[in-house]
Image (tube, grey):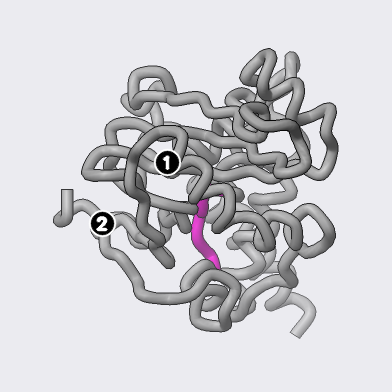
Amino acid sequence: MADWFTEHDVVQGEPEWFALRRGKITGSRANKLFARTTRGWAASRDHMVSLIAMERLRGDKAPSGSGKPMERGHEYENAAAEAYEFQTMQETRVVGFMTVNDFPNEAVSPDRLVGGNGALEIKVPTALEKHVDYLRNNSHVKEYEGQLRHTLYVTGREWIDIASYYPEAPANLQLAVKRLTRADLCLADYPDMLKEAWLEIEARQAELATIQSKAA
């Protein structure tokens, strides 16, 4: 699958990483673009369409999110990966950024790649009750379905494990791991979903460009 994607040797969170993400659909953005309610697309889709369209017009990155959940994730990501490796007896490796060769605006920053066929997405929830729900019901699968699907699409991998890590939990309850395959995440339909999203983004970009030119 090396001809499918390109790996970029950057550090997540550094300026070069932010520059690469600009104007692209990434894993976290796909999670918001393709979130659904009982009535259709969630409100986060329209917000994300506007953000990506504005980035493409501005030529620089929009302000990034930050806060306690993100800080906690960065703090414990390595420990979570080590715990996952110990529990599953699989080796992982860090990747900075990956883009699809034929569609370079479709990209992802996977937390880890696993062996030759897998990927790993790590979540470090701040609330114990969320982690318990992940342990009991695998609810992190539904919560992050869009991100998991996008990661498999970009990386070309066969499966992805989503792991919730809560270091304060008792022994043997710190990890909630669930594996999803390409079939589980309906990868066959995903290119069409992306095309539809890009049509919306391009239309929003054109609309904003018209407003911009009238105000000049």
Q: Is residue 111 left or right of residue 63?
A: left
Magenta range is 22-27
Element at label 1 = helix
Q: CA distance from mark 1 to mark 2?
A: 18 Å
Q: Is residue 36 left or right of residue 90?
A: right
Q: Is residue 178 magenta?
A: no
Q: What residue sits right under mark 1 in the picture? A: 195
| Badge count | 2
Q: Which numbered disc, 1 or 2, marks the residue closer to the eye?
A: 2
- At 68% from the left and 24% from the top, the residue drawn is 134
Residue 66, horizontal then vertical, whole percent: 78, 64
Return the disc, 1 or 2, that comes first in the chain's sequence. 2
Residue 178, horizontal then vertical, whole percent: 51, 24
Q: What residue sits right under mark 2 in the picture? A: 5
Quadrant in the rendering for residue 60: bottom right
Q: Amino acid at mark 2?
A: Phe
- At 22% from the left and 44% from the top, the residue drawn is 116
Residue 41, horizontal then vertical, whole percent: 68, 28
Residue 2, horizontal then vertical, whole percent: 17, 55
Q: Is residue 157 above or below residue 1?
A: above
